[in-house]
Amino acid sequence: MATDFDVYERELWAGRAPAYERGFARLTDHIAGPLLDAAGVGAGTRVLDVGTGPGVVSARAAGRGAEVSAMDADPLMAETAARNVPGLDARVAILPDVPFADGSFDAVAGNFVINHVGDPGAALTALRRVLRPAGRLALTCWVMPGVGALAVVRDALDEAGVPWPDDIPPAPFLEHGERAAFGRLVAAAGYSAVEVEDVLWEHAVDPDEWWETCALGGVGSNGVVVGRQDEPTLARVKAAYDGIVARFVRPDGKVSLPAHALLARATR
Ligand SMILES: C[S@@+](CC[C@H](N)C(=O)[O-])C[C@H]1O[C@@H](n2cnc3c(N)ncnc32)[C@H](O)[C@@H]1O
């Protein structure tokens, strides 16, 4: 059953695919390789990329010669993934609904989707159903509170004195965004051999492009809050942002933003 958080999420992503693809997807692409390694994806692996977004993981899996299927709750995301990965079976479906038969996949990979679902436990159970016996699951989430790439817009809002709105619901996954808790959540859904590791990297990006695609592009809750500000407030937030990202600047003018995620792997 859709929770209030699920309803919020549908609005959050609606129409955001183009901005997400030009900005955030380049950050999440860094971990797509390790995610597919954790899921044991190679040539011929039948893999489901759940919460595919613009097809970041699907593209990498197809590049390995895997047989890839994908799903996303947002129709424009699924359409974008299908455009980016020729021949991809990209379906529109909202976890915990998984429109595939029992045991259809050797592997399920989800890059930063579990932190966006209203009922993470139910989603994990549903994904286990479509794995064959001994099939592998790999999922990523952000470590909270986010750092660097995840934090610069939120920090700018705080520094500019913008209060966090009461109507933005906290993600039910939040309490699991830590190694041991994430592992317990996956194990509680019936998986075995559960392991969770930290993955850290740096994302080099033009700071104005990051502002444009993530903040002005309305991506994530930070983008939603930025989109609600009037011009003078927006100017204050941007000035704060410029000061914050200056700490990460490189000689070529780009900024090198740290990122910290958790990668969980498990067996059905
Ligand atoms: C942060 S994006 C990650 C996209 C992509 N996996 C990547 O690596 O960049 C989260 C994606 O999950 C999708 N999503 C959120 N809730 C979902 C749900 N309940 N079921 C399926 N997809 C969902 C969103 O529409 C969005 O495309």
Image (cartoon, helix red, strand yellow):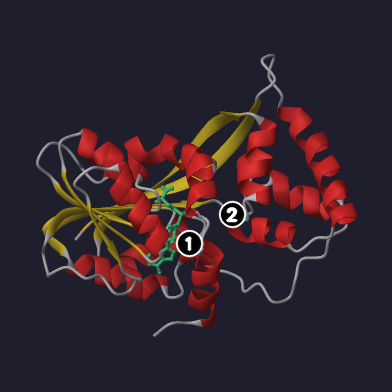
Q: Which residue is mark 1?
A: 115
Quarter of image, ligand 1:
bottom left
* Label 1 environment density (alpha carbons within 10 Å; few <14, some 14–19, many ≥20): many
**What's the amino acid at mark 2?**
Val
Image quadrant containing the N terminus: bottom left
Q: Nearer the viewer, mark 2 or mark 1?
A: 2
Snapshot quadrant of residue 93: bottom left
Which secondary structure lies at badge 1?
Answer: helix
Q: Nearer the viewer, residue 81 or 248?
A: 81
In the picture, measured across the screen, residue 250 lies left or right of residue 174, that is right
Q: Position of residue 48 (x, y in %)?
A: 23, 55
Q: Residue at x 24, y 40 (%)?
A: 61
**Whether residue 99 is situated above or below residue 179 in the rendered picture:** below
In the picture, measured across the screen, residue 11 lies left or right of residue 191, that is right
Q: Position of residue 190 (x, y in %)?
A: 25, 69
Residue 148 numbered mark, or none: none
**What's the amino acid at mark 1?**
Asn
Taking the view exactly as shown, the residue that stands out farthest to the top is: 251
Residue 219 numbered mark, or none: 2
Q: Nearer the viewer, residue 89 or 199?
A: 89
Q: Residue at x 31, y 65 (%)?
A: 187
